[in-house]
Amino acid sequence: MSELVEFTKAGGIAVVTINNPPVNALSPGVPEGIAEAIEQINDDATVKAAVLIGAGRTFVSGADIKEFDKIRSGEASGTMSFPDLLTQIENCKKPVVMAIHGNALGGGLELAMAGHYRVAATNAQVGQPEVKLGIIPGAHGTQRLPRLAGVAKALAMCVEGKPILALEALKFGIVDRLIEGDLLSGAISFAREIAGRPIPKTRDRTEKLGTPEESATIFAAALETARKKQRGMLAPLAAIDAVEAATKLPFDEGCQLERKLFMECLLSDQSKALIHVFFGEREVAKIPDVPKDTPTIAVNRAAVVGAGTMGGGIAMVFANAGIPVLLKEADQAALDRGMANIQKNYAVSVARGRFTQQFVDERLKLIQPAISYDGFANVDMVIEAVFEGMALKKQIFSELDPVCKPDAILASNTSTLNIDEIAAATSRPEFVIGTHFFSPANVMRLLEIVRGKQTSKQVIATSMQLSKKLGKIGVLVGNCRGFVGNRMFHPYVRESVFLVEEGASVEAVDNALYDFGMAMGPLAVGDLAGLDVGWRIRKEYRHLEKPGIRQAFAGDRLCEMGRFGQKTGAGWYKYDEQRRTTPDPEVEQLVRRWSAEEKISQRNISADEIVDRCVYALVNEGARILEEGFASRAVDIDIIYINGYGFPAYRGGPMWYADTVGLKRVYDRIRQFQEQHGEIWEPAPLLKYLAEEGKTFAEFTRGQGAIAEQPENSANSLFRARVLGRKYL
Ligand code: 3HC
Ligand code: NAI
């Protein structure tokens, strides 16, 4: 028997244990091992029934996702087809009880449903999350789940991909019994109970499939919802078709259609991109020069300074994770305002059913308002979120330094300022780090963790670990202006404004990028965040601008008119009291007039050009960031853009998208833009190099070194020597 599957007997009950840590994925060897066990069960007259269980922390978390590339290229190493195994299990002559703990996901749930009974630990979860990888269940899941759970529930699970808890699975007939206490002994007792009874097969059940008339409205509604909520994604639509097949075709034919759709999805660019994102979200936690076993500091108590938009949200994030947090403001009035905002935000969550009132009451007790540093001596980490201004930040850090424990981490939520300069205001620069939350902090998943020149590895490891505890995706970035996300966002927004100045309407620019898959168009984002934010920053940094380089002006002129966006009822668009958006013909007229004054010739601009201009501006800046070593890998940039800037996950992030288009094509297009628009479009040397070598960003970064502690760190100079040295110097 395969090493990954163990076979034992307990009385007349066979126990088959899958042991493929960490998540018991169905890697090559696992299906083969189970098939052998089933043969043995069939052949052994002393076996009356069987239990199949997972070793370690979980049942089976699905197909081995690493194998998908091999399936695509026809090089899969397993010798057994997983769907065939499921048929073999269902046809077993003795009843097979699937015992679920941890997760039964994807192929894991498909395996469970091919068994004759399912029992589950009370905290187990089951689901068909394949759509999140751009595929659909590929081993009868779309055919068996509606037979067990009914069409509506199966559709929801296969289309949205969200797992459900054991109790709900019991309610819907996906599992037959919940087991309190030891799962294996409970499952064995259950197996003894049902041994000798007629063996039920899921495939034969039709009572929950309904009639085509009954189901028609369910499918129509699912289609409408998927088109809206999973805009641009192909897999949810394929999942709907596959579940619909279960209601119209005999089981085997339904399975064939499912397989066809599964393979189409698997071969799609969307599934390649989403699988890149799945592994990317795990990869970003691995910092090349900060080993996994780096010691960390326990963060049991925290403090936040500044209870404004960000500080209040950050305090909620800590409280939601069960970490008590002090929230300090400059004065009582500001503190009261901050606490009132927190209460209001929690009330919205309760009204939307996200949290219960009891949960919120408990969380609120964890947030302790303060107007002095009393209690700061006991905290393990402080996050500063006061106004953006170097002098104020330095003052706060110099106040924190003497009152906090020597090994307390002092973090800044700054979005633009130099972490090293802030750290220099303390006697412990190695304990200073940037933790750049995104707004609203209690909702957005991204956390850019900014490494200063002297930030210690222990502090980096602690911050990365903490991000997971806080329910965030932490990505380590280097200390450059705007860090990774905002540094790239700047040229992206610049191009969107240029396009308007060159003749595109505000809606045409936003619609093109929305249709590309962005959560919102860049101009609408500006209105939401406040156009004045960028305007103030541009004014502050105007002295750094190179003379003779084209600058976008339309956004700044709107600000000069008091049009700051949603908060003033007008920006690129107009807003009513409920902040509903309408295009504003006045903006169109103004921009045309300003452009004429600036002698910018007007033309029709296609949606394709809008997308290329804006997205390639991201890519070109991303390439510079990589080249300079401010991101560890291209995938880090992708994860930042998907989780912090609404870039469509099904395109894999900007760098992956560029790889998909082909870097030579991207480079050629950027060269065209350079000819038309000048120096701002100079291609990044790394992009030029990779395009000429026929390589990808993903290839370049694989196995590369550490993130920049400062512009010229080892990885960076290594790159310069290796790439720039050979090609350009
Ligand atoms: N295949 C290969 N590797 C997997 C995997 C899978 N299905 N699931 C998890 N892993 C790997 C992770 O990459 C990670 O590797 P690393 O330590 O080298 O980074 C390791 O296992 C542990 O995973 P997590 O860090 O994610 O562990 P958590 O405990 O946080 O989460 C989990 C566990 C909920 C199971 C989560 O890993 C998960 O959601 N996995 C994917 C589940 C899934 O999508 N299943 C469907 C697969 S497609 C399928 O089954 C097709 C079928 O219809 C034929
Ligand atoms: P804000 O203006 O909403 O809040 C700042 C708060 O700091 C105010 O409530 C103010 O009273 C308080 N404060 C000022 N001096 C203080 C002192 N000495 N002690 C205690 N509190 C003091 O600002 P916001 O938007 O929350 O920004 C805070 C920081 O977060 C800034 O550095 C900003 O750049 C950054 N940031 C902002 C984002 C956003 O979208 N608003 C996103 C990411 C980062």
Image: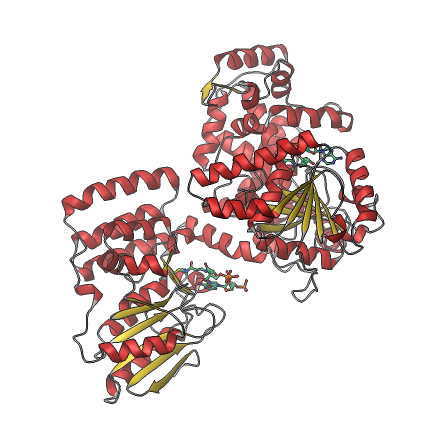
Q: Is residue 678 left or right of residue 514?
A: right
In-front residue for pair 608/151: 151
Residue 386: x, y in percent? Answer: 71, 36
Which residue occupies the foreground of this view, 603 or 402? Answer: 402
Residue 637 seen? no
The quadrant in which residue 228 appears is top left
On screen, residue 338 versus residue 16, left or right, reads: right
The way the protein has been coloured in the rendering is secondary structure
Q: Residue furthest right?
A: 427
The quarter of the image holding the N terminus is: bottom left
Depicted 355 relative to depicted 576: above or below:
below
Let me know if residue 362 appears in the view: yes
Give me the residue at 61% from left, 18% from top: 554
Q: Residue 534 sits in which quadrant? A: top right
| Left or right: 435 as drawn, with respect to 492 | right
Q: Position of residue 199 (x, y in %)?
A: 19, 74
Percent of width and height locating residue 671: 60, 35
Query: How far from the left and from the top, in percent, is residue 616?
Result: 56, 37
Q: How many marks?
A: 0
In the rendered image, the vertical position of residue 656 relative to residue 137, given as above or below = above
